[in-house]
Amino acid sequence: MRQQHTIGQSLTCSGVGLHTGHPVTLTLRPAPPDTGIVFVRHEVDGPVSLGASISNLVPTELCTAISANGTYVKTVEHVLSALVGLEVDNVYVELDAGEVPVMDGSAGPFVRLIRAAGIVAQERRRPFLKITQPIEVTDGGRRVVIEPASSTRITYSIQYDHPLIQKQTYTYDWSVSRFEQDIADARTFGFLKEVKNLWSRGLGRGGSLENTVVLSEQDVLNESGLRFQDEFVRHKILDLIGDLALLGTPFIGHLIADCSGHALHTKLVEKVLEQTDKWVLLSADAEPVGAQSRPTRTSYGLAQNASLPVSSPF
């Protein structure tokens, strides 16, 4: 087990929402131990907090969104991926609009913001959820399964009828350094032929060649090209890491995804929390927690609608 972490100081970045196209400013602020990741929307009547929890998940298209008490935040997966990938456990994510800024379409800008703020160890230790039996969700030919393993590993496969993608598979063995080097800078991608359809559905209005890898029938339209030959599948892992943040605690197991997406990722989180006989929670003392002591949705990291503590700067 490891210590919990927060950030050393508050830092801010600005951009536009990928789907709304609206300008938005995001500020990361340090949080006390056992807070988890809490989004904070500034409203006319004051700040509203939304815990990064599967209990706050709301249906949406092409992104992951949470909502509480009529307040929502869309496209949370990239900043969540950066926080989880760097093992930052406790932080407030303050927003002045309803969608996280897309930045360059990856988690890289958030990683660099977190690094600039500094990562600070806290006095409390972090529990882990250890998978003891396979848990699987499927949808036609798509599948996500998490299996017992001695460490944390993700194997992701995708297949698209495009000459630059076709079938790609990537295995990521969890570590902060590998996340920064191999995953964080992989950008979201889309197809030029789908742009008008997305706009008609109110999606992708903030997308551009500055924040999305755009594919024509044969090529990449971005002048800078790809950051990795298999950038597409690496971005899928980035998204998955962000979606798994809604579990509320790190896991130990091998997660295998085939042609999956946000909806199936979050269904797996729901199923893991439902099938409590297929995992154990390793406490801060690295001892398995018994059935009577299994976490509920209000345990550390699984808070439903986390409220701001008295010491909150908001």
Image: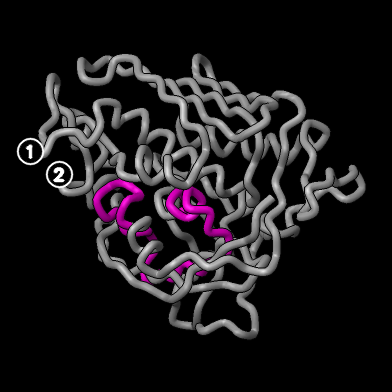
Colour approach in the figure: one colour
Across the whole image, how many numbered discs are drawn on residues?
2
- Residue to which mark 1 is pinned: 223
Q: Is residue 99 magenta?
A: yes
Q: Position of residue 268 (x, y in %)?
A: 61, 34
Q: Nearer the viewer, residue 285 or 160?
A: 285
For the residue pair 253 and 307, the one nearer the viewer reads as 253
> Residue at left 40%, top 33%?
236
Q: Position of residue 70 (x, y in %)?
A: 53, 64
Q: Residue at x 27, y 15 (%)?
A: 161
Figure check: 239 above or below 233: below
First in sequence: mark 1 vs mark 2: 2
Secondary structure state at the residue bearing disc 2 = loop
**Residue ranking furthest to the left:** 223
Q: Which quadrant of the figure has residue 223?
A: top left
Q: Is residue 291 left or right of residue 235?
A: right
Confirm whether the magenta stretch covers residue 108.
yes
Q: Which mark is residue 209?
A: 2
Mark carried by residue 179: none
Residue drawn at point x = 51 percent, y = 73 percent? 30
Q: Amino acid at mark 2?
A: Leu
Identify the image quadrant of residue 197.
top left
Name above or below for residue 181 compared with residue 92: above
Determine contact: label 1, label 2, CB under 8 Å.
yes
Magenta region? 80-109
Q: Position of residue 150 (x, y in %)?
A: 68, 30
Residue at 47 percent of width and 73 percent of height: 8
Crowding near pointer 1: few (<14 within 10 Å), some, many (20+)? few
Dot 1 lies on which element?
loop
